Image (cartoon, grey):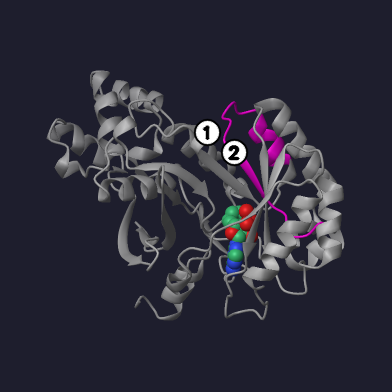
C-alpha cells in the first residue's frame, strides 16, 4: 500500500510514463495531493487514471484526523489514524508569524527515554514519507490553507512521537517533499528536526543539502547521568554528539539547538548548569529549557517555573544563550505520546 504523497514529483513522472499518461498529470497529482484532496475531490483527473492508480495500490489519503482537542491557550492536539488502524498524534501551536505543527515520525519509539510517553510500548512501525506529510497536509486543509504562500501551516517541528533519525530515509523524503515547489512548499529554514543524538545519522543529514534546523535532546551534560534517562547515551557520548553538531554547522551554516527537559533533582542542579557552560560556551548554539510534562507512568518530577528561570540565569550569566520554552497545551496531554497512550489505554475512547 502506498499513497500519492509518498512520491516525489520525479517519481510521479515515472509512474505516469509507465501508465502511458502525459507528463502534466504528475504535476496535477502532486499539487492535488498536497491540497489533501481525495480521489473523489480531484475533478481534473480522469477516472480511468484514478482506477489505474488504485489498481497499483496507490491511494489518496494516508492519515485522517480522528480527534481534535483544543487547549485554553489555543494549542490544538490532533489524533491521526493510519490506513492500518494505528494512531499518532500531532500538536498545532499558534504564534505571531503563523502556525507551527509538531509531527510524529514513527508509531511508538525504540528509544525509551525515561521521561517520555512515546516509547512506553516500544516501536510499532515507521511512518512512510506520505504519512508524515499527510499530518501537515490534513491540518493545513482543516485551517483553510492552500499551497505555497497560501499555506496555513508555516513551520514544522519533528518533535512528536518517534525518533526521526531512526526512520531516516522516510524522514528525508518527507523533508524534500514538504519543501518542494508546486506543493505546500515549507522552507527547510522553517523546519526543525529533533533527535536524541544518533550520531552517524547527524553526519548523513549534514550531507543532504537540506539545511533544516538541528535540535538535539541533551537533557544532561554528564554521560553517566544521561545514560540513566536516555538509553541511547550508552551508544554515543556527548563529545561525539558535539562533534557531529560542529560538522552540521560547518556544512549547513545553521546554528543548532539543545533541548533540555528539567527534571527535579536529576539534572537541574548547579553542577549541571556549570558543566553545560563548560561544554557549550563559544559554540554557535542555543539551549531550550523545557519544564517536564509529568507522565503518570514514571515518577519523575517537574521543576517550578521559578527554579527553571534560575537555572536559565546561571546559563545566561555563563555566556550561554538559553530560554525557557513557554508551556503550551498542558491541559490536553501536550507532551509526546501522552494522548496516544491514553487512547490505547481506553481502547479507542477519549
Ligand atoms: N525523538 C526525538 C523527537 C521527539 S521528542 C528527540 O528525542 O528529540 C521531542 C522533545 O520533547 C524532546 O526534547 C523530548 O525530550 C521532549 N519530551 C519528551 N517527553 C517529554 C515530557 N514528558 N515533558 C517534556 N518534554 C518531553
Examine the structure image and report whether residue 217 is included in the region drawn in magenta: yes
User: Disc 1, disc 2: CB below 8 Å?
Assistant: yes
Q: Is 193 placed left or right of 313 in the picture?
A: left
The magenta-colored residue range is 200-221
Q: Position of residue 343 (x, y in %)?
A: 41, 74
Of residue 167 and residue 179, the one placed in the foreground of this image is 179
Q: Quadrant of the C terminus?
A: bottom left
Of residue 23 and residue 274, the one placed in the foreground of this image is 274
Q: Position of residue 129 (x, y in %)?
A: 45, 42
Of residue 339 and residue 307, the one placed in the foreground of this image is 307
Q: Is 340 placed left or right of 313 in the picture?
A: left
Classify mark 2: residues with Cα within 10 Å, few (<14), some (14-19) or many (20+).
Answer: many
Classify mark 1: residues with Cα within 10 Å, few (<14), some (14-19) or many (20+).
Answer: some
Q: Quadrant of residue 56?
A: top left
Residue at figure coordinates x 64%, y 32% from the top left: 254
Q: What element does badge 2 sit on?
A: strand
Residue corresponding to mark 1:
189
Q: Is residue 236 visible?
A: no
Residue at figure coordinates x 51%, y 51% from the top left: 105
Q: How many marks?
A: 2
Instruction: Identify the mark nearer the N-term, 1 or 2.
Output: 1
Examine the structure image and report whether residue 67 is included in the region drawn in magenta: no
Residue at figure coordinates x 48%, y 73% from the top left: 341
Residue corresponding to mark 2:
213
Label 2 CB less than 8 angstroms from ligand 1:
no
Q: Is residue 60 visible?
A: yes
Q: Quadrant of residue 41?
A: top left
Q: Position of residue 9 (x, y in %)?
A: 37, 26
Q: Position of residue 348 (x, y in %)?
A: 36, 75
- Residue extending farthest top: 23
Of residue 259 and residue 98, the one placed in the foreground of this image is 98
Residue 164: which disc? none
Amino acid at each position: 500500500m502506498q499513497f500519492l504523497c509518498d512520491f516525489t514529483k520525479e517519481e510521479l513522472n515515472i509512474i505516469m510514463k509507465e501508465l502511458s499518461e502525459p507528463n502534466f498529470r504528475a504535476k496535477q497529482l502532486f499539487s492535488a495531493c498536497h491540497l489533501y484532496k481525495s480521489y473523489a475531490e480531484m475533478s481534473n483527473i480522469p477516472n480511468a487514471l484514478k482506477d489505474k492508480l488504485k489498481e497499483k495500490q496507490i491511494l489518496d489519503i494516508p492519515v485522517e484526523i480522528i480527534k481534535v482537542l483544543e487547549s485554553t491557550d489555543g494549542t490544538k492536539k490532533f489524533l491521526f489514524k493510519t490506513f492500518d488502524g494505528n494512531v499518532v498524534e500531532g500538536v498545532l501551536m499558534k504564534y505571531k508569524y503563523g502556525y507551527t505543527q509538531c509531527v510524529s515520525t514513527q508509531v511508538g519509539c525504540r528509544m525509551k527515554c525515561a521521561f517520555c510517553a512515546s516509547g512506553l510500548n516500544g516501536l510499532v512501525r515507521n511512518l512512510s514519507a506520505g504519512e508524515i506529510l499527510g499530518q501537515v497536509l490534513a491540518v493545513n486543509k482543516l485551517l483553510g490553507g492552500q499551497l505555497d504562500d497560501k499555506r496555513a501551516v508555516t513551520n514544522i517541528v519533528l518533535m512528536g512521537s518517534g525518533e526521526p533519525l531512526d526512520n531516516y530515509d522516510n524522514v528525508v523524503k518527507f523533508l524534500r517533499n514538504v519543501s518542494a515547489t508546486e506543493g505546500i512548499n515549507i522552507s527547510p529554514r522553517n523546519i526543525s528536526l529533533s533527535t536524541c543524538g544518533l550520531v552517524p545519522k547527524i553526519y548523513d543529514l549534514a550531507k543532504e543539502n537540506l539545511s533544516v534546523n538541528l535540535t538535539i535532546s541533551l537533557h544532561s551534560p554528564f554521560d553517566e547521568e544521561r545514560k540513566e534517562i536516555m538509553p541511547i547515551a550508552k551508544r554515543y557520548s556527548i563529545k561525539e554528539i558535539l562533534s557531529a553538531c560542529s560538522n552540521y554547522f560547518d556544512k549547513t551554516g545553521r546554528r543548532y539547538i539543545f533541548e533540555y527537559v528539567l527534571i527535579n533533582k536529576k539534572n537541574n542542579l548547579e553542577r549541571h548548569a556549570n558543566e553545560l557552560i563548560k561544554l557549550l560556551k563559544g559554540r554557535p548554539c542555543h539551549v531550550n529549557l523545557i519544564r517536564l510534562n509529568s507522565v503518570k507512568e514514571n515518577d519523575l518530577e517537574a521543576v517550578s517555573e521559578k527554579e527553571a528561570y534560575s537555572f536559565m540565569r546561571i546559563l545566561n550569566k555563563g555566556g550561554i544563550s538559553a530560554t525557557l520554552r513557554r508551556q503550551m497545551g498542558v491541559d490536553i496531554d501536550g507532551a509526546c505520546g501522552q494522548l496516544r497512550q491514553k487512547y490505547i489505554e481506553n481502547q479507542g475512547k477519549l
